[in-house]
Amino acid sequence: MHVLSDGRLGAPESAVRDQIATLNAAYSGRLGGADTGIRFRLDGVTRTVNAAWFRDPVVHERSIKQLRKGGPETLNLYLAQLGELVLGYSTYPHGYSKAPTLDGVVIDWRSLPGGAMRSFDRGFTGVHEIGHWLGLLHTFEKGCAATGDGVADTSPQGRPTEGCPPVKDTCEGDGPDPVDNFMDYSDDRCMSGFTAGQALRMQQMWAAYRGAGADTTLDG
């Protein structure tokens, strides 16, 4: 975990620990949905005071990610301040071989559990972005097209969810949109789990790109 700060603002230690606990609750299925078989262990925390990095991690991404540690199996999570429109972003497993230094996830520190980001204050931004790091696409990927997100047990979804609607169905005849899925854009209070198909995809992507014996020279 790499905590960036401007000297005044930044993620406190308690929120860092709570984020790890939230990841394990989400990926174990304790909040709903499937147990993915994936767990997280905090191996260390770096703290860097740099106002420019903190306030604009996109522009300074290459400099920030010099902090990266470990190989393809090591998640590096960077906590900075992004903005209302972008809560976080992630690399994908197949990109590691081309740009290993850039591998990792960046999220807004205010989205951690108990944070100040309205509607996104339960730590699920981290859950969502790490889903990408593990190989998942958005549930609304390619809209209502048959291939969708490449996972058979997530219903086709024509557009991202806003807020927390009780029912939403943007692709007629294929079941309601999975608004409770961590890979949608729903408010945190609406999200609760991954599907068994998503769990399998993450396991397969881990074996191919990140796990012991993975061929990290693959171009995807």
Image (cartoon, rainbow, N blue to C red):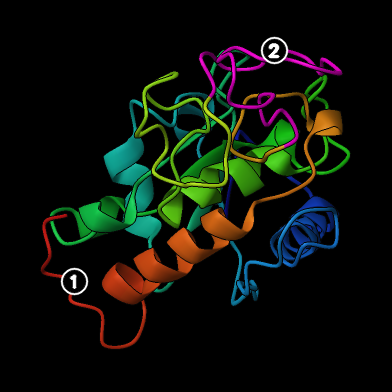
Residue 16 placement, left or right of 218:
right
- The CA span between labels 1 and 2 is 36 Å
Q: Residues within 10 Å of mark 2 (few under 14, many from 20)?
A: few
Q: Which residue is mark 2?
A: 162
| Magenta stretch holds residue 148 | no
Residue in the image at 13% along x and 55% along y: 98
Is 78 on the left-hand or right-hand side of 19? left
Q: Is residue 213 above or below residue 122?
A: below
Q: Are marks 1 and 2 in contact (CB under 8 Å)?
A: no
The amino acid type of the residue labelled 2 equals Glu
- As for residue 174 lying within the magenta part, the answer is yes
Position in image of residue 180 (x %, y %): 75, 35
Label 2 SS: loop
The span shown in magenta is 157-180
Q: Does 123 sit left or right of 160 as displayed? A: right
User: Residue pushed farthest front?
Assistant: 173
Picture coordinates of residue 116, whole percent (x, y) = 83, 26
Local crowd at mark 1 within 10 Å, few (<14), some, or many (≥20)? Answer: many
Sequence-first tag of 1 and 2: 2
Q: Could you tell me if residue 179 is visible in this image?
A: yes
Residue on which disc 1 sits:
216
In this view of the protein, which residue sits in the foreground, 30 or 34?
34
Can I make out residue 10 in this image? no
Seen at 50% across and 41% down, the residue is 106
From this view, report whether residue 25 is shown above or below residue 95. Answer: below
- The secondary structure that most of the magenta stretch takes on is loop
Name the outermost residue toward the bottom.
Answer: 213
Q: Amino acid at mark 1?
A: Thr
Q: Residue at (60%, 73%) from the top-left corner?
A: 44
Name the image quarter holding the C terminus: bottom left
Please identify the quadrant where the N terminus is shown.
Answer: bottom right
